[in-house]
Amino acid sequence: MDKPQSGDIVEVQIEDIGFEGNGIGRINSDFVLFIPNTVPGDIIKAKIRKVKKKFALAKTEEILVNSPVRTKPECSHFGSCNGCKLQNIDYYHQLNIKKRNVTSSFEKIGVFQGLTIPDVIGSDNIYYYRNKLEFSFSNNKWLSEEDFGKNTGNSFALGYHMPGFIDKVLDIEKCHLQSEISNRILNLTRDFFKTKKESIYSTKTSSGYLRYVIIRQSANINDAMVNLITLQEKKEIINKYAQKIKNEIPEITTLVNSISTSKAQVAKSEYSIIIFGKGYIEETIGKYKFKITPSSFFQTNTKQCEKLFNTVVEFADFSKNENVLDLYCGCGAISLYISGYVNKVFGVELSEESIKIAKENSSLNNINNCEFTSYDVKEFLKNLINKNEEKYDTIILDPPRSGIHPKSAEYLLRYEPKKIIYVSCNPTTQARDIKLLSEKYEITKIQPVDMFPHTFHIENVVRLDLKN
């Protein structure tokens, strides 16, 4: 047969892992199969599930030969949960996979040839490394692959959303990405509200009380926050919940109840009520302290974040008379971290909340050479090239996964800073953007940093220098 049919059983060897963490194999010499939970080197029997024009999706029926890099996952939810797709692969080999993915992005998307990509800087902690986890409430619990598309009725679940479903949630008992305290909070929260028979928000009716619980913890300070996101205020039930967690998990330093009436299934809120504690936590990176509010962005792997920031400092090779523009600065973490190496830093971020926190963080650390403004980055660069003001020697880019706007690249080319340090959590959009900038800039340094062990995500730092 030239192309497999849905339901066919085929034997295939897994050759590689794709960006989404699915194993890649080939049949009939060049027809590609994507198979979840497989490892390079596995030889398996696979069942074809869905056939496309040039590839097919399949699932493992039987492992005939185990790959030498296959390892036993720690988590009992592995295979159902969509989080740690690489947990069945030896960590050293995970780093090699991520290095290949960075190389592939720059060669195929950026069309850069002859680049030497160094080994990925690995994480010292490969479990319990996250400082933030977000869990969803649902009355439509995921049971198994066999219940695909079925509504499981009034089943109380608190865990992670299943891909492709609006309200179906995998009930999580223990996640290996955050601390044991986090798992205690998760299970207490489920048991408390389930016992109270409290309602769960439904997208169909736009009603129901419970929506999300977000747990944030400091790695270097004994601070822990629980942020319960609900449709409306219910003082009696939230006060009982507060008393319960105070009594049973004294490590929690603050509880916040955030209110969200939006129909969108995203964990954002209109306002927050501090139930007890400060309403925020604090964290340190190096010698700097940061305030983290319920809604502020902060790098989720604190220990590895210091390695990332040190890479930025090393690549930039700052001088004391240097002026730096930090674009997409968030709560000012990079700006403050580099402040002691330079003359001054100016941070730009669209979110007014993040800029407010950045200014507070600057005051918290008694730093007086950092300024921040809330502005769209593209519009800020547009205005910058039309003004005859003090020149920024270095520009730091740390955009969201979608990368920078093409107009921003155009304005950067016109502004011509001496060097650009581009930090990205998505090498594919990073390579695309740097291809645009390569008209006037050349890559002089590159370094992947693994912030997210067991996932296919990778952070990458690139230094670009203005061509002579």
Image (cartoon, rainbow, N blue to C red):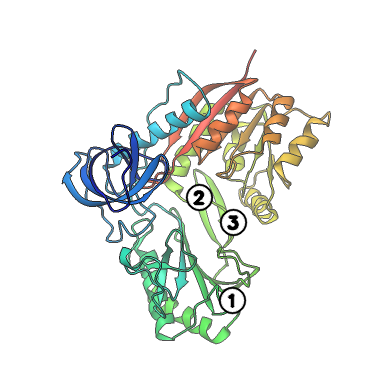
Residue 120 seen from this side: no
Residue for badge 3 = 296
The secondary structure type at the circle numbered 3 is loop
For the residues labelled 2 and 3, the Cα–Cα distance comes to 15 Å
Q: Residue at x 34, y 37 (%)?
A: 31
Crowd band around label 1 with a 10 angstrom C-alpha radius: few (<14), some (14–19), many (20+): few
- Give the number of the mark in front: 2 or 1: 1
Q: Position of residue 257 (x, y in %)?
A: 56, 73
Residue occupied by mark 1: 206
Q: What's under tag 3, amino acid-wise?
A: Ser
Relative depth, front residue between 132 and 4: 4
Q: Which mark is residue 284?
A: 2
**Quadrant (top left, top right, bottom left, bottom right) of the N terminus:** top left
Tag 2: amino acid? Thr
Left or right: residue 413 compared with residue 335: right
Residue 34: x %, y % from top left: 35, 44
Q: What's the residue type where badge 1 is placed?
A: Ser
